[in-house]
């Protein structure tokens, strides 16, 4: 993308929903980086790493719309309206979202509202943490000897959504590897549901915090022990949970983590 004068002279703006990836700046897409370098306004989430924010055009207006459990800088409706308002006055408006905009990032909701308002919009996919964090921890989500299927599921659901809750007992047997986003606070209930569905308490589980960043942390255990381990270590969100036999490969592959 080139920051041409012609682009900036348009009488309407365009919103880009850009996936920032999981944190490692090397995992930011080339397209996403080039758009950040041209941006007039960037509205970013709390989980976007400082290294990614450093890529933003230094003359751009930067707005923190970050959402963390119990601490919302902007309500979702306010964020969407802000995008619409900024597009009236600026050529290139970026909604910078951690991971991928369409994987538990509410990008689909924001895009639909922008389309409804007549605002040009484009999505730029990013690498989602549910793939990247396990990879950096030496855990392949699929492996010919351990797993040929993966389920991605959120552990933190919105109130008033189309279904009252995730059917955890169905998820338990839906695939050989389960990846849970935003599930640390709800993990005791999730494990209770899994074991009620017949999963063994010895089923391996890995928690990966701040995946792909220099301060990445991992906690490896089993369904029957992981809650006690969390309490002993003080392990906290944000983290990805990986459940299944592929977690056994952590001990072998984690020494080869990216640098």
Image (cartoon, rainbow, N blue to C red):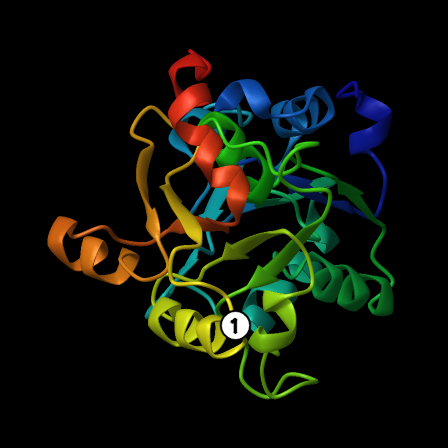
Res 23 visible: no
Work out which quarter of the rendered image holds the C terminus and state it: top left
Nearest the camera: 208 or 27?
208
Q: Name above or below for residue 70 compared with residue 41.
A: below
In front here: 40 or 138?
A: 138
The image quadrant that residue 250 belongs to is top left
- 193 up-or-down from 13: above or below: below
**Nearest the camera: 180 or 59?**
180
Place of residue 163 in the rendered image (x, y in percent of width and height, measured from the top left): 67, 85
Q: Residue at x 65, y 74 (%)?
A: 170
The residue at which mark 1 appears reads as: 198
- Say if residue 116 shows up in the picture: yes
Q: Which of 253 and 214 is in front in this view?
A: 253
Q: In the displayed image of the protein, which residue is found farthest to the left?
A: 232
Quadrant into which the N terminus falls: top right
Image coordinates for residue 67, horizontal then vertical, percent? 43, 60
Q: Which residue is drawn at 77% across and 59% down?
A: 111
| Image side of residue 50 versus residue 166, left or right | left
x, y (%) of residue 162? 70, 85
Residue 254, given in percent of the width and then of the height, sits at 41, 22
Which image quadrant for residue 49? top left
Q: In this view, does 80 lie above or below 133?
A: below
Choose top left, top right, bottom left or bottom right for residue 37.
top right
- Is 78 situated left or right of 191 in this image? right
Q: Which residue is drawn at the image coordinates 73% and 55% (left, top)?
A: 88
Helix, strand or loop at label 1? It is loop
Q: How crowded is mark 1: few (under 14 residues within 10 Å), some or many (20 or more)?
A: few
């Amino acid at each position: 993308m080139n920051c041409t004068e012609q682009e900036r002279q348009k009488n309407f703006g365009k919103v880009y929903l850009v996936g920032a990836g999981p944190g490692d700046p090397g995992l930011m897409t080339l397209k996403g980086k080039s758009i950040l370098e041209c941006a007039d306004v960037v509205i970013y989430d709390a989980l976007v790493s400082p290294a990614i924010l450093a890529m933003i055009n230094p003359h751009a207006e930067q707005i923190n719309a970050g959402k963390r459990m119990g601490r919302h800088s902007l309500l979702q409706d306010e964020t969407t309206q802000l995008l619409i308002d900024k597009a009236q006055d600026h050529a290139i408006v970026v909604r910078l979202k951690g991971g991928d905009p369409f994987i538990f990032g509410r990008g689909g909701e924001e895009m639909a509202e922008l389309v409804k308002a007549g605002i040009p919009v484009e999505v730029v996919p990013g690498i989602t943490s549910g793939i990247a964090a396990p990879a950096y921890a030496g855990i392949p989500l699929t492996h010919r000897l351990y797993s040929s299927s993966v389920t991605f599921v959120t552990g933190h659901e919105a109130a008033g959504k189309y279904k009252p809750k995730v059917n955890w007992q169905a998820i338990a047997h839906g695939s050989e590897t389960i990846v849970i986003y935003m599930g640390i606070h709800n993990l005791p209930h999730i494990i209770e549901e899994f074991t009620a569905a017949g999963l063994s308490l010895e089923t391996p589980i890995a928690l990966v915090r701040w995946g792909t960043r220099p301060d990445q942390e991992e906690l490896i255990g089993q369904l029957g022990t992981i809650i006690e381990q969390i309490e002993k270590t003080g392990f906290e969100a944000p983290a990805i949970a990986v459940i299944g036999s592929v977690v056994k490969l952590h001990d072998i592959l984690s020494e080869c983590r990216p640098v």
